[in-house]
Amino acid sequence: MTKINFNKVSSVHLIGIKGVGMTALAACLKDKNINISGSDVSEKFITDQTLKKMGLSWWENFSADHIKNQDLVIATGSAHQGPDNPEARAAVQKGIPYLTHGEALGLLMAKKSGISVCGVGGKTTTSAILATVMTLAGERPSFAIGASEIFPLGQPGRCDKGQYFIAEADEYATAKGFDHRPRFYWQNPKVIICTNIEHDHPDIYPDLEATKAVFGQFFAKIEADGFLVINGDNKNNQAVIAKLNKKVITYGKNKNNNCQIKNISLSPGKTTFSLQYNKQDWGSFTLSVPGAHNAFNATAAIITLQNLGISLAKIRQFLPKFTGTKRRFEFLGKTSQFEVWDDYAHHPKQIKATLSAATCWFGKKRLTVIFQPHTFSRTEKMLGDFAKSLSLANRVFILPVYDAGRETGNPEKLAQKLVKETQKYLPQKAFFYQPLKDKPRFRGVVLTMGAGDVWKIGNNLLKND
């Protein structure tokens, strides 16, 4: 990896600046008074407004002409042709240092005590809870979180004066087709939080065992005085930590965990739960976001904060101030007939958790899901699991697969296959959806769901009703 001292960098060009991870990175670099240029596709992204609020602009599409005399070029890694992008090639030809997002984030974290949050599902929310409580407690943490906005903090990245740097830690490839080391390979944290280990990227890892192996390697990197906070209810997590020679703190509903979650109560507008930590009663906590899965995410954050010296009193005071992030169970608006919410869930277990929360949050309101599958390999591999998870809704509309250029396939054909699978559980209530052609009537709650651009449909429904 190219060694870069960001304190000596005055200008950076970001290839794929509108990606959520790159937007967070841009916010961090801006805090270091670095001049930022960028480029991306012309398609509207969820991060457009966030970047504009930061005073940043970008070129639409990619050209070698955009690379002038910048000190550094950073690319998303796997998207936009990776190192074969014309701007990446121009940087190499001109001798300008080039990094992937994963490498750059690792270098930014290197001067701080890193807190890396990994796992399938919950990374963004857990990281955002940590950043929110630490900030309100006066710790001035740095953070880079894959959401276009954190409520109430605002922008998703910051470089501040405090000791800690909080970052999402992704197991996906650094640059698919070029460097298949996981993105979290570049992080060397003091603390790791792991939510759930699942087989999520079949285009990179052939099976669950390969996935577990890279997580085990990452856990082994924890600093000598650091620790791992991990969901002890997950069997895959248990298998990976069985031989780990690090300080491990487990959490979950099972009484064998170091921290046991009890009395989860879900109601419209509020989630409450209580904790028992190594037989000590930590009392109850309140969340302003829905779902038992978020009680788990918050517990991981609470354990970490307490072990880093932040009092339970402060945690209890500031935890309810966190009201979510962009694209995580986000309210978009309502009409006289229906309200629209949006969520990033794109793995069967995430979908199940989100829909379980939604049924409690919305009570008896009819729940319609508009789901956009993400990547061909994941959709094909987990077809049955997706169908079972989606069956928790009252009605499901399935869009063509969104792949973001990672793979090749027929997006409509595979989506139709998922529709047929889902109809096994929801007869006459699961449909293939073409927004420009189909005009179904909606009432109750409409929840758009997926990792692509499905959020645009929710906004359009509100405009066109």
Image (spheres, helix red, strand yellow):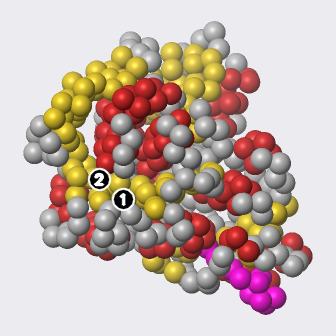
Residue indicated by mark 1: 192
Kindly indicate the quadrant of the structure image that contains residue 155: top right
320 over 375 or under it: above or below: above
Front residue (pair 357, 6): 6
C-alpha separation, residue under disc 1 versus residue under disc 2: 6 Å
How far from the left and from the top, in percent, is residue 106? Answer: 53, 69
Kindly indicate the quadrant of the structure image that contains residue 30: bottom right
Label 1 residue SS: strand
Q: Which residue is drawn at 71% across and 55% down?
A: 31
Quadrant placement of the N terminus: bottom right
218 over 145 or under it: above or below: below
Front residue (pair 223, 383): 223
Q: What residue type is labelled 1?
A: Ile
Query: Can residue 358 be seen in the rendering of this structure?
Result: no
> Is the Cβ of the residue at disc 1 closer than 8 Å to that at disc 2?
yes
Crowdedness of circle 2 by 10 Å Cα count: few (<14), some, many (20+)?
A: many
How far from the left and from the top, in percent, is residue 442? Answer: 56, 19
Segment tinted magenta in the rendering? 91-100
Q: In this view, does 231 lie to the left or right of 100?
A: left
Crowdedness of circle 1 by 10 Å Cα count: few (<14), some, many (20+)?
A: many
430 over 204 or under it: above or below: above
Residue 99 colored in magenta in the image = yes
How far from the left and from the top, in percent, is residue 373? Answer: 49, 49
Q: Which residue is drawn at 33% across and 26% down?
A: 285
Q: Which amino acid does label 2 sit on?
A: Val
Front residue (pair 25, 407): 25
Please give the count of numbered marks on the rendered protein. Answer: 2
Marker disc for residue 229: 2
